[in-house]
Image: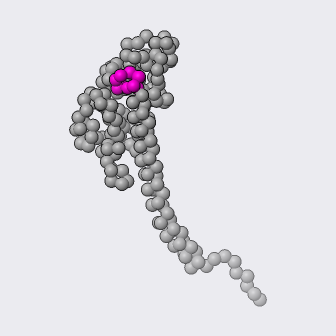
C-alpha cells in the first residue's frame, strides 16, 4: 500500500519562516525612513505655502500678519477678530479670515473686509513632524528668538512680525541631520 502524504514538514515550515523574517528585516526599515521623509516633505510644503500667504498679506496690507490687532472692526453677520497686536491670535485671524487695510478681520466677506483669507483652513496648519499649530510670535527678529536654543520639542511655528521670518519650532534634526528650525 502506498501512503499519500500531504502537508509540509517542520523543516520546510522553518525555512519559510526564516526567509520571511529576513525579508521583513530588510523591507520594514525602508518604509520607516520613507515615512519620515514624507513628513519632512509635507513640512517643507506647508512652510512654503505659509510663507507665500504671509508675503501676499504683506503686499496687500504693508505689514506682516500679527503686527497689528485683528480686533476692532464691525463684522455684521460674522465673527470679528479678537487678537491684539503682536499676538498669535492676530496672526491666525489675519491669515485665515477676511481683512481690511488696518488688519481687522471678519469670518465673512463684507465690503469693509475685502481681502483674504490667505489660508483656506479655519486655523493655522499643524507642522507635519510635531503635529502642532501653535505659533510663537516675536515682535523683533533676534537670532536667539527665532533659531536654535529657543526651539520647542512640541513643534509648531515661530514668526517675527518685524521681518516676516517664519520657521519651524522644533528643536531636533531631520533624517539628514539638518535642524528643522533652519528650513
Colouring of the image: one colour
- Given the current orientation, which residue lies at the most extreme bottom position? 1
7 vs 147, left or right, is right
Residue at image coords 59%, 78%: 12
Residue at image coords 35%, 40%: 168
- Between 114 and 95, the one lying in front of the other is 114
Residue 65 position, x and y percent, is 36, 25
- Between 61 and 169, the one lying in front of the other is 61
Q: Is residue 116 above or below residue 171?
A: above
6 vs 69, left or right, is right
Residue interval drawn in magenta: 57-66
- Between 133 and 40, the one lying in front of the other is 40
Residue at image coords 43%, 19%: 99
Q: Is residue 179 above or below residue 80?
A: below
Residue 53 position, x and y percent, is 42, 31
Residue 18 position, x and y percent, is 51, 73
Residue 70 position, x and y percent, is 38, 19
Q: Is residue 168 above or below residue 164?
A: below
172 vs 49, left or right, is left
- Which corner quadrant holds the C terminus? top left
Name the image quarter holding residue 131: top left
121 vs 92, left or right, is right
Q: Report if residue 182 is visible in the image.
A: yes
Asked if the stretch drawn in magenta spans residue 3, the answer is no
- Which corner quadrant holds the N terminus? bottom right
Q: Report if residue 137 is visible in the image.
A: no
Report the label total: 0
Amino acid at each position: 500500500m502506498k501512503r499519500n502524504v500531504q502537508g509540509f514538514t517542520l523543516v520546510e515550515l522553518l525555512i519559510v519562516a526564516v526567509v520571511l523574517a529576513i525579508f521583513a528585516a530588510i523591507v520594514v526599515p525602508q518604509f520607516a525612513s520613507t515615512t519620515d521623509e514624507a513628513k519632512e516633505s509635507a513640512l517643507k510644503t506647508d512652510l512654503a505655502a505659509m510663507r507665500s500667504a504671509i508675503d501676499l498679506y504683506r503686499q496687500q496690507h504693508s505689514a506682516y500678519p500679527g503686527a497689528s490687532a485683528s480686533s476692532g472692526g464691525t463684522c455684521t453677520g460674522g465673527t470679528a477678530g479678537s487678537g491684539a497686536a503682536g499676538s498669535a491670535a492676530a496672526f491666525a485671524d489675519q491669515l485665515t479670515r477676511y481683512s481690511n487695510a488696518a488688519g481687522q478681520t471678519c469670518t465673512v466677506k463684507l465690503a469693509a473686509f475685502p481681502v483674504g483669507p490667505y489660508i483656506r483652513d479655519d486655523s493655522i496648519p499643524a507642522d507635519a513632524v510635531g503635529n502642532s499649530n501653535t505659533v510663537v510670535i516675536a515682535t523683533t527678529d533676534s537670532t536667539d528668538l527665532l533659531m536654535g536654543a529657543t526651539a520647542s520639542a512640541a513643534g509648531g511655528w515661530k514668526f517675527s512680525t518685524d521681518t516676516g521670518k517664519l520657521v519651524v519650532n522644533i528643536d531636533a534634526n531631520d533624517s539628514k541631520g539638518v535642524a528643522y528650525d533652519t528650513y
